[in-house]
Every structure is written in C-alpha cells, then in structure tokens.
Amino acid sequence: MGLHGDGRGPAGGRAARVGPRRSGGLRGGLAVFAAVAAVFTLTLPPSVPGGDSGELITAAHELGVAHPPGYPLFTLVAKLAIILFPFGSVAYRVNLLCGFFGAVAASLLFFTVFRLSGSYAGGILAAGVFSFSRLTWQWSIAAEVFSLNNLFVGLLMALTVHFEEAATAKERSKIAKIGAFCCGLSLCNQHTIVLYVLCIIPWILFRLLKEKELSLGSLLKLSLYFCAGLLPYVYLPISSYLNQARWTWGDQTTLLGFLTHFLREEYGTFSLAKSEIGSSMSKILLSQVTSMRTQLSFNIQALAIWANICLARNICDQRTNYVIDKFAKNLLASMPRDAIILLRGDLPGNSLRYMHYCEGLRPDISLVDQEMMTYEWYLPKMAKHLPGVNFPGNRWNPVEGILPSGMVTFNLYHFLEINKQKKTFVCIGIHEGDPTWKKNYSLWPWGSCDKLVPSEIVFNPEEWIKLTRNIYNWTEEYGRFDPSSWESVANEEMWQARMKTPFFIFNLAESVSVPSAVKAQLYTYAYNLYKEIVYLQKEHPVNWHKNYAIACERMLRLQEKGTDPEVLISETIRHFRLYTQKASNDPQLPDILIALKHLRKELQSLRNMKNV
C-alpha cells in the first residue's frame, strides 16, 4: 500500500478547527448584540443625562469641539446619529448610539471568549456579566465616551486573538494593518485606551519579528495605518477655523492650541478611574472563564446573569428619568427675558447649554461660562455668538490691564457695569477669584442661582419672598436617588433652593446694621419661612432642622408679642435633636449638644414657673 500525502499540515488542521468556531462566534456575537441592544434600548434615558453628556451632545449638535482632548470621533459619529435617527430628542438619539456601542462591545467580548474557550456558555456569561454590571450598564446608556471606549477595547482584544490564530503570513499582515488602524482610531476617543495600545503593539511587533515577517517596509506601512486612524483629529482645527459652533472648547487653529487641547493641559488629569468601568472587568473575565466553564453548569451561569441584571435594573432603568431635563428647564423658565446667566460647574453649565442650543429653549437668554472667560481663546471665539452681551475686553481677570499678547483684561465689576441694561445671574455660585463685583453689587437668592443686584436697590423681603417662593415646579422626593448620581446632585440643588431666601433674610438680620425693629422683622420673616418649608415635607435636607432651630432660638430672644416661649424652646429642642441624630459629622455638634442641655433646663424652668 502506497503512502499518500495528508494535504493538511499543522496550519491546515488549525484552520479547520478555527473555521467552525469563527462562524459560530459570529452567529453568537450577533445574538448577544441583539439581546444587549434590546435591554439597553429599553432602559435609555429619554433626555439629557448628567455629567459631561450635555456638553458632548451640544458639541456634536453644533459641530464644535468637546472638552480636551476633543473626542473628534465621538463628536462626528454622534452628529450622524442626530441627523439619521428620526425619533426622540437630540439627547435620546446620542444615548441610543451609545447603547449600540455598548452592545457591540458585548458581542466582541463574547466573540473573543468563545474563540479562546470554544464555549458558548462562557462567552454569554462573560458578555452578560460585563454588560449588565451596574457601572457598565449605567454608562452604556448615557451620551458618554465610555461605551465607545469599551467597544475599542473589545475590538482590539478580538483582533489580538484573531492575529494569534492566523495561519499564514498574509493573514497576520492583514490583521496587523487593521489593528494598527484601529489603535490609531481608538485614540481619537478616550485616551485611557493607550494602556491597551502600549501592550498590544509591542506584542504584535514581537510576534512578527519572531516569524521573520517584520521588515522596515512593513513597519512603515503599519505606522501609516496607525496614523490614518488618527485622521479624525483633523476635524478639530477645521471646526475651530470655521468657528460656526455656538459652543466649542479651545482654539486648535495653531499647533500650540492643538497640542494644548490634545494633551489636556486645560482640563482634568490623565485619570484611569473612568476606564475601570469596563476594561479591567474584561481582563478578569478572560482569566476566569475557563474555570467558570468547568465548575458551573449553563443553568447556574444563566441564573448568575439574571441575578446581576435584577440587581442593577433599578439603578440602570432610566426610561422615565427626566431629572436633569427638568432641572435645566426649571432654571431657564425662572429667568426674566434677555437675562445673562454666568454659568459655573458641570451640572448647570452642560444641562443649560444642551437645552438652550440643542432644544432651542429660551433663545433670548445669553449663556456665558465663568471659567471659560478666564481662557485666552474663549471671548475671541465665542463673543460673536453672544450678540446680546457686551465685553469690556478680551479676557476676564480681576487685575485689569493689557497682557504682553495685547489682550485687554477686565474684571467682573466692569462686566456688570457695561451690561447694566440686562439682568445678570450666576448659576451656581460665583468665581471666588474676583471680588470686584462687591464694590457696587449684591447677590440675592434666585432659586439655585443668585441675582447680581446693584447696591442702590433696597431689598424688600416681602416682595422677594413672593417672587421666589414658587420659583420652581419641583416634585421629586428628597433622597430618592443614588447619592453618587447626578440626579441626586440636581435634586439636592432644587431642595436647597427652597431654603435660600429664608437663609439670606436671616443672614441679613444677623449681619446688617439696621434698627432693632427692622432686625426683628427680618428674623420674623426668616422664622415663618423656615417653619413653612420644614413642615411642608416629611423628608427634607437635614440642615433645615438646624436652620429652623436657630431661627426659633432667635425669635425666643426677641420676645415678640404673639409668640409662645414654651413653643419656641420646644421647637428648638426638637429640631436640634433631629439634626444631631442625622448629622454626626458636623464640627459644631458638641456645641449643639451643650445648647440642648441648657435649653432643656430652660424649658423645665419655664414650665415650673407656669405651674406655680
């Protein structure tokens, strides 16, 4: 019997084994994508989420530049989603896009684990636990860059496995080029992906070198593919040069300006915290999947995924979440016509910008960013988009003068003076670095914001109480949101806004030199307002108890006609006691406890006198 050649060497056998896995992995990946996309779509927030979402959506809507490093890829793809998706609010369309990114990331993770282990159950478990963990789910349904980052992590992992299984030099070369392009493209999104890129590239080059497939020419080609992936960054100087966006960040028309933005010199730090939402979980799952596959049955794995979904569902189901939407709409609705709002902070800044520019609310209002006014680029680029606002220079600085660059600086006092024909508000808070406004202006409470009022205007407490009592239509229960969420921050701001007017009036009584009759009237106004809001709701911020207790104590000192000392002392004791039970970290707690001891003795003495 003659010997016949096999026709399949080791590489051929390897390809035969990989072929069924590849087709099975694709089918399974599509099924995982469909399942995860369905869940994410059903739990999407219908409007703008908190955090950077409002700014990212606005940058995409306006075709501007987002905060450093610019996120050009996300901006461009989000703009396409805004144009192509024919339903929902502008924010919903970008939220939906990010949900799809998250579903693709899940399918890529399934594909990778399935290719490594050959187990459908292992791939489904990995994709399910990753996708429906609280943080991944939470940030995959919001207009943020994280789900796209997760997609690139999954894509690079899948390409790495594909490269490892490649049977021929031609196939390895093809995958390496695709991978080089994807590495560059991934850096057009979140820069934390560099941790993966710096691990993958040396390993790929080492493997090519080991296979004697790495030459100077091939290295140059891979570099060109990598650079091609970075091409979306060309969008930054183009957008900056055109200067058509009503909201943008930075001036990238010069090399220095581009590098400043790209290297994040004006914004934040190179923090790895956010990338831990998904990427570290992927490594853990990959290292443990084999043992899980052997130790757990498919039914147990399915139950584990279902338990994880149930655990996260209450937090991650955002389909009725309009909290940030209502927060921004309430702030805008409270403003008089043609007002100037000096924005400060992510919550009011990003949410109001979204409502104003993307949803077209209150076009009569001018939004000016306090922090941005201190940057050299802000007014030269943005002043033309704020036609109703006058600027007495090119840059906000408490020290006025002319900079070496020729820029004219101005302080807040002169800004207010030159815009005196308009009502100006600060939301939320005012920049501490420039106190010049105090020369001729005061801050009066206006809900969560404050109004800058010329000092010659006399404060009328009764009129101001009527003006601000029902300034917002806010119905959210206090304390119903996760304390770490933006919804909780917005809810807290709205609840504390109810306390600002009585707090302001009380402080006037404490600090302003006025006749005793006026002081007594101010204390009485504050006391009545505190009492009204404290007893209006069963649950409210804990500091309300302290403020009301102090107001009761001041009324006790006044000994006004019509007040019952026993009632006032009892109220003071009750609310100080409630406060001490809930605010254990207050440094004034020892003093409050001493005051409580004294007040109890005073109450007992008063009751003894009544019984005589």
Image (tube, rainbow, N blue to C red):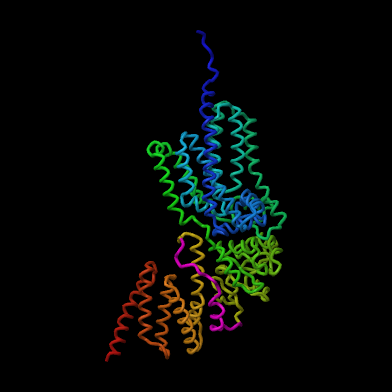
- Which residue corresponds to the image point at 60% horizontal and 40% vertical from the top-left? 182
Residue 445 vertical placement versus 134 (above, below): below
Q: Is residue 458 magenta?
A: yes
Identify which residue, 187 or 292, lies in the foreground: 292
- Which residue corresponds to the image point at 65% horizontal and 34% vertical from the top-left? 221
- Which residue corresponds to the image point at 46% horizontal and 62% vertical from the top-left? 481
Q: Is 330 displayed left or right of 521 in the figure?
A: right
Residue 191 visible in the shown view:
no
- Which residue corresponds to the image point at 71% horizontal and 67% vertical from the top-left? 387
State the quadrant of the C terminus. bottom left
Q: Is 181 displayed left or right of 108 in the figure?
A: right
Residue 46 vertical placement versus 417 (above, below): above
Q: Is residue 574 magenta?
A: no
Q: Tell me residue 67's x, y (percent).
A: 60, 55
Residue 87 vertical placement versus 402 (above, below): above
Extreme-top residue of the structure: 1
| Residue 209 found in image quarter | top right
Identify which residue, 386 or 400, lies in the foreground: 386
Residues shaded magenta: 456-481
